Image: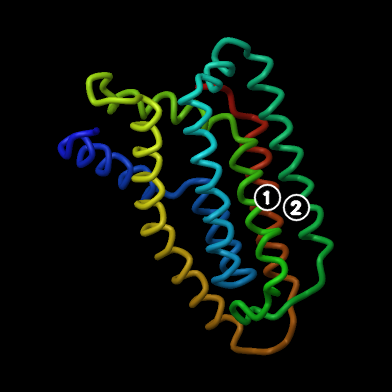
Amino acid sequence: MIDFSTLALFSGACLALTATPGPDMLLIASRSVSQGRRAGFATLAGIQAGTYCHALAAALGLSQLFLAVPIAYDAVRFAGAAYLLYLAWKTFRSDATSLAPDASTPRRSTATIFRQGLTTNLLNPKMALFVLALFPQFIRPENGSIAVQILVLATVLNLIGLVVNGVVIVSASRLSRRIGARRRPSKLPQYLLGAVFVGLAARLAAAGRN
């Protein structure tokens, strides 16, 4: 089992990484502002499920494919960018909504939002390379099963991400309540979220493996 000092060091690294604004935080915040707290947490849950999938792939050695076969990395990268553009197109075409929190997101759509968060994470090959780069530094063969250690580290990363991004979600949803004190529907939330999807697509399409 991973010793306490290693977990503490890994936790510090995760806190520094998750507290630094990045694509996931931007997506979660914009989703929370545009569609409320429930949508923000559904997006976060999807992203964190994707983290477990990447950790499992690393444990099975599948993530090494991106290092050995560059075209596989590029194929997933462009598929992810195309999916994000598709989400942007759907978002821009959606009806105007009020900025009222949670009520603007029907319960039946929570599963869809979760799947979108999961898919955007799975189609981001840089996440797979991130796991490959960070996790091995904290894994020791003498501590037992490598796969178990990887999953433990993924759980720690997700727990810290839950705390950090949970604060972002609550803050963003409160901001949407203040802005949306008026009941008049607006396309602004859709434009904001759609612009985020376009920006993430451009970033992913332009990104190399470094």
Q: In x, y percent, where is residue 135?
A: 36, 29
Q: Where is residue 178 shown, x and y percent of the image?
A: 53, 83
Q: Residue at x 50, y 41 (%)?
A: 51
Image quadrant where one finds the N terminus: top left
Residue 18 coordinates in the image, percent (x, y): 39, 47
Q: Quadrant of residue 113?
A: bottom right
Name the residue tied to disc 2: 88
Q: Is residue 58 left or right of residue 77?
A: left
Residue shown at 27% from the left, 19% from the top: 141
User: 208 and 145: which one is in front?
Assistant: 145
Q: Which mark is residue 25?
A: none
Residue 188, quarter of the rendered image: bottom right
Q: Amino acid at mark 2?
A: Ala
Query: Is 92 drawn above or below residue 124 in the view shown?
Result: below
Q: Is residue 37 above or below residue 192?
A: below
Q: Residue at x 37, y 32 (%)?
A: 148
| Mark with earlier residue (1, 2) | 2
Provide the secondary structure element on which disc 2 rests. Answer: helix
Q: Name the residue nearer the viewer: 105 or 178.
A: 105
Q: Image check: 13 left or right of 18? A: left
Q: Is residue 81 above or below residue 76?
A: below
Separation (CA) of disc 1 from disc 2: 5 Å
Q: Residue furthest front?
A: 144
Task: Residue under label 1, please give it.
Answer: 197
Residue at x 58% of width, y 18% of height: 66
Label 1–label 2 contact, CB within 8 A: yes
Type of amino acid at the residue the image marks with label 1: Phe
